[in-house]
Amino acid sequence: MLRQRSSASTWVAVTRLAPETRIAALERAGAAILRCRAQRDGRVDLRDLLRRLALKGITSVLVEGGAAIHGAFLSQGLWDDLSLFVAPRVAGAGAPSWAGFSGPPSMKQALALGPLQVRTVGGDLLVTSRRRGPSPRKPRRR
């Protein structure tokens, strides 16, 4: 992750509870560290992270990872565009979801995507969409 051809910085978000030895190791490897507030579960507060990035002039981010991070961005409404690669494999009922958040009780309440575009990339499908409707707003903490 930290050894790339690009001259762009690699930002690593941590909470204030992150061990200093690990932070120092990341910095030695070339990472730029953003110390963010933690949520109740101890994970990085994504709204705080995005605010801090915006203060540094970064207004577009690519989120790569697993179901937990994708689900966090989607369920908190912290996205504008979705690009989803679908491999030609059928994993079955026990396979992990790409969007790890609790689903709604009905399809009517499910996250609605805007118009879809689909194209092949290598042997995979790339499905892209923009958000439909306004971003859900959560009340600010005071």
Image (cartoon, helix red, strand yellow):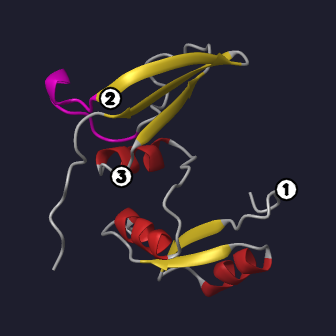
Percent of width and height locating residue 27: 72, 79
Residue bearing the label numbered 1: 5
* Label whose residue precedes the other's in the sequence (2 or 1): 1
Q: Give how far apart the Cα atoms at labels 2 and 1 are.
A: 34 Å
Give the camera-side residue of 37 and 122: 122
Which quadrant: the C terminus? bottom left
List the residue tagged with mark 3.
78
Q: Amino acid at mark 1?
A: Arg
Q: Which residues are magenta?
A: 100-112
Q: Is residue 32 above or below residue 105?
A: below
Would residue 48 be found to the left or right of residue 12 on screen? left
Q: Is residue 109 magenta?
A: yes
* Position of residue 8 measured from the top left corner of the image (x, y, whole percent): 73, 64
Mark 1 to mark 3: distance in Å? 28 Å
Identify which amino acid the numbered label 3 is placed on.
Leu
The image's mark for residue 113 is 2
SS assignment at label 1: loop
N-terminal label among 3 and 2: 3
Q: Nearer the viewer, residue 86 or 54?
A: 54
Residue 74 among those drawn in magenta: no
- Quadrant in the picture for residue 104: top left
Q: Is 78 in front, or is 102?
A: 78
Image marks 1 and 3: residues in contact by CB distance under 8 Å: no
Q: Residue at x 67, y 78 (%)?
A: 22
Against 114, is 93 above or below?
above
Q: Residue at x 18, y 70 (%)?
A: 140
Does residue 43 appear anywhere in the picture?
no
